[in-house]
Image (cartoon, rainbow, N blue to C red):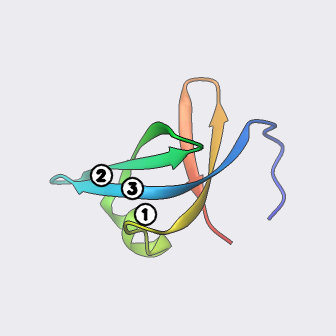
Amino acid sequence: MKISARNVLEGTVKEVKKGATTSHVLIDVKGSIITSSITNESVDELGLKAGSKVKTIIKSSDVMVAVD
């Protein structure tokens, strides 16, 4: 995966809290928790669950999640 963002942090999903349409994904990055709000569809497509290894991409005020 190549991306232009420079703020890429590797972490582990701690918890996925699904709502009606949006999920909050809590990611442990070296002891700090980063929360990303993404669609339930994205959670399902990425196969996110507790223990998943992910990369958080921080650009401006957004936190995105990527997997290889």
Q: Residue at x 84, y 43 (%)?
A: 4
Q: Which residue lies at the image location 37% right of the left edge and 72% below the top edge? A: 44
Closer to viewer: mark 1 or mark 3? 3
Q: Residue 39 appears in which quarter of the rendering?
A: bottom left
Give SS at disc 3.
strand
Query: Could you tell me the amino acid type at mark 3?
Result: Lys
- Residue bearing mark 3: 14
The image position of residue 57, as x and y in percent, is 65, 43
Instruction: Decide if residue 32 is on the left or right side of residue 67.
Output: left
Image location of residue 7, percent across then percent down: 74, 36
Q: Residue shown at 49%/71% (left/top)?
A: 46
Q: SS of the residue at dot 2?
A: strand
Residue 42's tag is 1
Mark toward the start of the polypeptide (1 vs 3): 3
Return the x and y of residue 47 as percentages of the image width and height: 44, 75
Which mark is drawn over residue 23?
Answer: 2
